[in-house]
Image: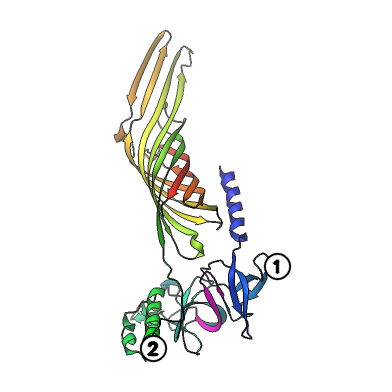
Amino acid sequence: MKATFTLFLLLTCTLAFGQKSFVAGYYLTHTGDTVQAHINDQNWKKNPSVIEIRNDQNSYVVQKLNVTDIRGFALSTGDAFEAFIVDLEKSSAKADEIVLLGSQPVVVRDTVFLRAIVKGNVSLFYLNDQDSQEHFFIKKGEEAPVELIYRTVPQQNGDRVGYMQVAIYKGMLTAKLTDCPEVAGKIPGVSFKLTSLKTIIENYNHCVSGTKGDFQAAEEKMTFRLAGSGGLTYTSLAIKNDPDKSISGKDYNGVSYTFGVSLISTFPRRKGRSSLLTEIMYKPLKASGTGKEVNSFSEEVYKTTTTTFDMAYVGVNILGRYIVADTKLRPYIMAGMGHNLLVSNKSRQVIYNRFYDEETTTEKKMNTDDLRKYEQSLQVGIGAEIKNILAELRFENGNGFSPVSGIKTINNSLSFRVGYMLK
């Protein structure tokens, strides 16, 4: 099992890093020429510093262009980037990473591709740098873009040091948008978020020119899909350290079914590869096994115990899911936690005793009150989706139903599911 998952992960990582997706677009040279090309579109979450181009869609020759080689580029899928030399504030907004009291903010000058959000009389640009810090830039007319600053600064009160957030960006917006008093009056309510900044810039452009801008990036937000799925589950249950020797130290196996509904919450960028999967599943546990105890003095005296675990759980699973290749058949990997609640128990034991020529058979039910009702589990899986159909293989390792810390119940299961995603 471990070897299979390791091999799959190596394969999917190779696919993820090796995949290319060339789409129509163009780039701007420093001499002002517009060159049509096909550009490797990675739907970047972090702004790129290098792009790959082909002069023709069917060409095998790939050329790399650095941020200093061109003035910018745009893709038919909607993204547009421009190269600028900018001053970046690298100071952290996290309290535990803020520089020592009294020190100056860390500002570096760099040449970067800025993603256009709005272009007009006033333009808004976005940068997610290599340290995953977000930056917003404003550009008015032919001026150079300047970063909007939202700074966390230390503040000392006697022997105590606290932290205060300073919305410098609001003053910067006021200075740029002051020639439209109606819009400038709304700046105090503008939050330091892309959607809020985009709206105020669009409103300003509409105020001074009658349009929101010459270019507006498409709005990006999470998308949600419902899916139903079901399949078969193979269970391997192990019980250790139970004083009842009729069940302890034995393995119990069985096959059951599972079904339920899922909510797939997909994050923007990266072509929708990352998502959060929330499931409600009905998960029966069916496993059985037989143990035999033989008298040390005579083989004609023995006892066999057949234990059948027949339980039903309702589980809430929360997993992260990542699509490793943006192809027609989209393979994915997933990992997360399961939280299972015992809702039904029909487990029983059939005990057969033989004492020479005497035979007796008794049956007893397992008392639900003696079981832990809540189980936690770790889940990993692989799968693939094509159009609205998905299929996956998932491994689940749970801590079982023993309420006693010294007695271990190890619940391992492997399930194969197929499902259908609603649009």
Q: Residue furthest bottom?
A: 179
Q: Which residues are magenta?
A: 74-92
Q: Which residue is mark 2?
A: 208
**Could you tell me which residue is drawn at 57 percent across and 72 percent down?**
48
Q: Which residue is mark 1?
A: 61
| Depicted 42 relative to depicted 233: above or below | below
Residue type at the position of mark 2? Val
Colour option used: rainbow
Quarter of the figure that contains the C terminus: bottom left
Q: Residue furthest top?
A: 357
Nearest the eye: 401 or 205: 205
Q: Residues within 10 Å of mark 1 (few under 14, many from 20)?
A: few
Quarter of the figure that contains the N terminus: top right
Task: Look at the image and tell me whether residue 168 can be seen.
Answer: no
Q: Examine the image and state in which quarter residue 76 appears.
A: bottom right
**Can you give x and y, in whole percent of width and height, for residue 364 in the image?**
33, 24
